[in-house]
Amino acid sequence: MSGAPLPVPAPALVDVSGLRIGIRQGSREPLRVVDRADFQIGRGEIVGLVGESGSGKSMVCRSLIGTLPRRGAFIMSGRIEFAGHDLASIDERAWRDIRGKKIGYITQSALAGLNPVMTIEAQLREAIDQDLSANAESSAARAKGLLDVVRIRRPEVVLRQFPHQLSGGMRQRVIIASAIAPRPQLLVADEPTTGLDVTVQAEIMKLLRTIQADMGLSILLVSHDLALIDDVCEKVVVMHAGACIETAGVEQLAKPKHPYTAALQRSRIELAAPGQELVTIVGRPPAVGSWQAGCRFADRCDMARSDCRQGDHPPLRPIGQGRSSACLHWDRLP
Amino acid sequence: MDATDHSRSAGRRVLGSLGYRTLRAAAVSFWVMVIAFGLIRLAPGDPVLARLGAEAEPAAIERLRRQLRLDVDPVTQFVEYFLALLKGDLGVSIENGRRVSDIIATSLPVTLWVIAVTVVLGLCMAVPLAAWVATARHSSVPYIFRAVTSVFLAIPAFFTALIALIVLGVHYGVAPIIGYKPDFPENLYYVWLPALVICTHLVPVLSRVLYSSIKETMAEEFVETGVVRGVGRLRFYWYYLLRPSLAPSIVLLSYMVGVMVGATVIIETIFSLPGIGRALVGAVIGRDYPVVQGCVLLFGLAVVAINLVGDVLASWLDPRLELR
Ligand SMILES: Nc1ncnc2c1ncn2[C@@H]1O[C@H](COP(=O)(O)OP(=O)(O)O)[C@@H](O)[C@H]1O
Ligand SMILES: [Mg+2]
């Protein structure tokens, strides 16, 4: 035995492994919508979760806030470790102490994410009341303080308004304010800038970054658009057809080790060229319920060989430098 | 944009739109009055003959006609009627000489009580029912709901009324068969069954509309926020499910109440309630012009007012709806 002992890695805040999510369909077999999600979120880390729409990103988010049952969905197998709990198996009572309090949630659409019949103040107070460590500071003062944190000018006016009186960007700031009000350890942001102008999108991303740095929380940032999040994230998890197929540091992604990630990158570069037809990835993602055997990307992949179409979906495997890929032939990529 | 200006101008808009609506209501009422005045005169028959009988002396007929100023041309009659109306005078019944305003004052409250009890009863049944069906875990609940409400809608209200009267009134004696006492709360004893009968149609329609609104609301993202925040059960039902969903149902209810004001005549006849519907039917049969005009004008005003209340209530429930 020689050499220095290996540094013990700090345990991740969130560790999702082998997660499968199904949707109940009466007496029939449940419909699998997520099959093999594996990723970790470190403390104070911003992790991006990207993939085409329909790849199961929102389902993964809901499994982290315990709202799957509302959609008739449930966790079929796998673990979600979070601060000493396995979120995949805790009951509703335990969820009540975690959901919204230790794990905050930012809805997909800024325009639909606020309650239309409540004033901003009422909604923020509801969120503030979730803070278990509430101190003497009055909730009115804290509501105002929160709006300052998310850089809303004239908070005393905004507090009295209803969501439809605010612009999309303002609304998303309010949503962020209410999500961070109980001082969560993790923030799940499901496509938080859908429907906003590009410039506003960038501002919201910057805001998330600042809040993360100030509060030291971790963020899972979901997007179908790689370009949007790669300034903000440290690490990116790529999903395709219900499976995590690649995880890597954000700089490492310049050299993708999965053909799907490579295709995402290409479509992004070609999108940027003006006056050109929109280039998307060949073919469509396989519909849930009709996933083929083997790698679910095989039918869209020009590298696929016969072994790609056999057995289960290939698992995500470490390939060195802290990154992982689910491609059997990742070493053939440049 | 400046937020203060926004809320100030919103306030001005509400006031402005109330003024506009009042004007519109006045215009609608005027035309209702013109139509009532014209239609009852177009109908064949004669109020004087109706009162004195066909065998009356021509001289007596002529005298009464002059006394009632029915001998002048219709335009003059209308102008005189309108000028009197502006002074608050609705005229006098040809049939029995009672002031029309008195007739309305005694019969209108009966109808209003029936409608008020119907609305309260209907909301108390439709709102919990719709909320329960929309949030029911078992997938067969909405199907059963739809089937049962269809059955209720398919049964004519007058039939239900007759059966209810025979079963509950005659056989079990838990409801009155006839009569009315005007004082609250004794009058409730006389209106609960008619109200329940109207509810057999009102509740299915209302709960279906509300059910689909709640379903739409439940699919919205802010509901997920409420779940994540873990707001209390009652608070969740009211602020996250019902209040964002109620506005269309309230607008519908106000229209249905408008229709009901006219339709209560059937129920009032079956249950022998001395309401305004029955007063109107009697007046039309007797060609009692002033009473017909007064009642129809009142119906028009009631419908306009109820719709206004419905719209104000809806925009209070849901701030997204600004009054127009
Ligand atoms: N209630 C449902 N019934 C059937 N399929 C569903 C249901 N909800 C979602 N899905 C399917 O699950 C898959 C994953 O959905 P989602 O997690 O919303 O994807 P993403 O957020 O990545 O766009 C999609 O293909 C979607 O069609
Ligand atoms: Mg989604």
Image (tube, coloured by chain):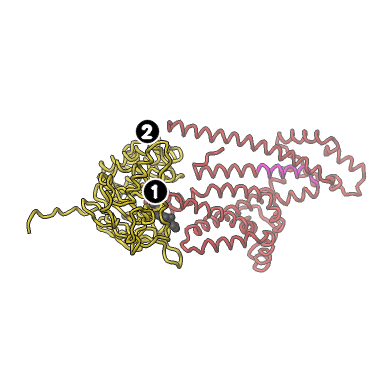
Which chain is home to disc 2? A
From the top left corner, tell me how far across and down residue A209 is, in percent.
29, 41
Q: Which chain is red?
A: B
Can residue A44 be seen here?
yes
Question: Mark 2 falls on what kind of element?
Answer: loop
Query: Gap in Å between the C-alphas at discs 2 and 1?
Result: 45 Å
| The magenta segment | B287-301
State the residue at coordinates (53%, 34%): B13
Q: Quadrant of residue B146?
A: bottom right
Counting the numbered discs, the total is 2
Between B35 and B93, which is closer to the camera in this rendering? B35
Q: Nearer the viewer, residue B102 or A327?
A: A327
Are both tags, 2 and 1, on one chain? yes
Name the subunit of mark 1: A
The residue wearing badge 1 is: A281
Residue type for callout 2 = Arg
Quarter of the image with the N terminus of chain B is top left
Q: For residue B25: magenta?
A: no
Counting from the top left corner in percent of width and height, residue A240 is at 36, 53
Q: Nearer the viewer, residue B60 or B267?
A: B267
Question: Residue placed at 40% from the left, 44% from the top?
Answer: A279
Q: Which chain is yellow?
A: A
Where residue A67 appears, as percent x and y from the top left, is 38, 56
| Image side of residue B298 versus residue A30, left or right | right
Mark identifier at residue A154: 2
**Mark linked to residue A259:** none
Instruction: Judge from the rendering whether residue A197 lies leftward or rightward of residue B125; answer left or right.
Output: left
Query: Would residue B42 appear left or right of B155 to someone viewing this image?
Result: right
Question: Does label 2 or label 1 sit earlier along the sequence?
Answer: 2
